[in-house]
Image (cartoon, rainbow, N blue to C red):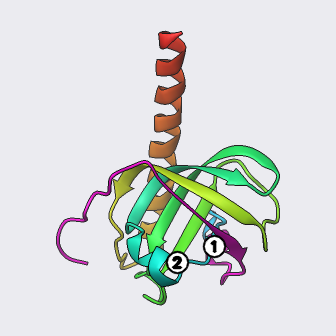
Amino acid sequence: MSGSPVVPELPLVFSGVVQTGQQRGRQLGFPTANIGVAGPAAASLPRGVFAARVRGAGTEDRWAVVNIGHRPTFDAGALSAEVHLLDFTGNLYGQVLEVELLVFLRGEKRFAEVGGLIAQVALDVEMTRNYIHNKVVNNAMEV
């Protein structure tokens, strides 16, 4: 992908049903809830990787790393929203999740090797955890 990504106005909220994917995130060590995005709503979603808060599926709010794009490293197929919930294990298939994109981390990128993608996603998770930590520390200081 060429050029600089367009950084969207945040926060931005969207929701959708968790669908069965190719299990690739799980194979890479970062399982994802794949949310179906299509039609006019999909056209308005920004592309890239984000730190996010996720609600739904009968669970408490959770932090996540979200990729919205076309998976250029693997197949550059249809637009998808892949949600990696931090510190979560469980089955969310068929459930509706509400995703609140909070911080733009980076644009979508094609990696020559899967190892590069794994390293980058680990960094995305670390940046999200740093955002969470800073948010908690700053909120505690304001009280």
For the N terminus, give its image quadrant.
bottom left
Residue pictured at 35% horizontal, 77% vertical: 110
Query: Where residue 34 is drawn, which disc sits there?
Result: 1
Instruction: Give residue 17's position: percent from left, percent from top.
Output: 69, 72
Going by the image, does 21 lie left or right of 58? left
The amino acid beneath tag 2 is: Ser
Q: Is residue 124 above or below residue 45?
A: above
- The residue that label 2 is drawn on is 80
Q: Secondary structure at mark 2?
A: strand
Furthest residue in direction front, as rendered: 40
Instruction: Verify whether residue 10 appears in magenta.
Output: yes
Q: Is residue 111 above or below residue 91?
A: below
For the C terminus, give its image quadrant.
top right
Q: CA distance from mark 2 to mark 1?
A: 7 Å
Residue pictured at 45% horizontal, 80% vertical: 40
Which one is in front, 140 or 118? 140
The amino acid beneath tag 1 is: Asn
Instruction: Give residue 114's position: percent from left, percent from top.
Output: 47, 75
The answer to whether residue 118 is visible is no
The answer to whether residue 88 is visible is yes
Instruction: Give residue 96's position: percent from left, percent from top.
Output: 72, 65
Residue pictured at 57% horizontal, 69% vertical: 82
Where residue 20 sits, quadrant-wise, is bottom right
Circles 2 and 1 in contact, beta carbons < 8 Å: yes
- Please give the range of residues in magenta: 1-27
Which one is in front, 114 or 75? 75
Q: Residues within 10 Å of mark 1 (few under 14, many from 20)?
A: many
